[in-house]
Image (tube, helix red, strand yellow):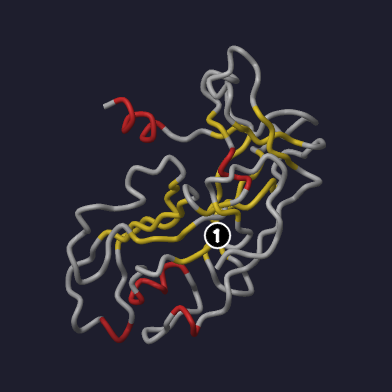
Amino acid sequence: MPSDELAPPNWPLSVIYTSCTIVSPHFPSPQLHYINRLAKPNSTLRSLPPLPLCKHPKDVARIKLVTQPDHPAKGQNGLFAVRKVEAGAKVIDYVGVIHSRTPEGQERAAVDEHEESDYDLSLIRCMSVPLPSESETQTEPTLIDIGIDAAKHGNAARMINDYRGIASKPNCEFRQVWDPVSGWARMEVWTLPGVGLKKGEEVLVSYGKGFWAARTS
């Protein structure tokens, strides 16, 4: 559920701002233990702790319209450091909709609303490990592929651009972490070791070769 927190300046009206990640209503309950370490075989979304709030770090980063003529994202938004950020430090949470690309017990939908999204990150990707109660019925492992998509619901981290065409290398990276209190898997953005951010510098990551290959094929 979206939070009541006000969207930061320069937020696009076409996207719902939220400071709390959402689990898709279509997410299969048997896969909850892959995204929450407190989940049991009979857990439901309502039985688990609420997803943690990830408020916008206004003292760290801000959304800004890109105006440089040679910038690949000219006319679009980017995320920029408000102050110096040390190397190996957290910048912002990546908030969106957690969804499964491998629904259990059914064929993949013909139309996946997240499939063509440019804001969909891989949150969990592993081979399935049966829970104790499933060990007698599950024989073959399957690929668990879970994403977090900020195309329609998200926070300022969705404005982060790829470094290509802007800088020689990224200054930040995506990191999947576990919330120690609620047990939820989270995606965060951190400055790279030995790099850091200068005041006014754009936050840049690598989208990965797979991202660009899918859009040029």
* Relative depth, front residue between 167 and 139: 167
- Please give left or right for residue 39 compared with residue 62 in the image: left
Mark 1 element type: strand
Residue at the spot x=20%, y=76% of the render? 138
Quick one: which residue is furthest to the front in this view?
13
Number of other residues with Cα within 10 Å of mark 1, as a class: few under 14, some 14 to 19, many 20 or more: many
Q: Quadrant of residue 200?
A: top right
Above or below 91: residue 136:
below
Residue at the spot x=36%, y=35% of the render? 210
Residue at the spot x=61%, y=46% of the render? 189
Above or below 70: residue 2:
below
Q: Amino acid at mark 1?
A: Arg
Which quadrant of the figure contains the C terminus? top left
**Residue at the disc numbered 1:** 186
- Please give left or right for residue 10 compared with residue 158 in the image: right
Residue 12 image point, x, y percent: 59, 42
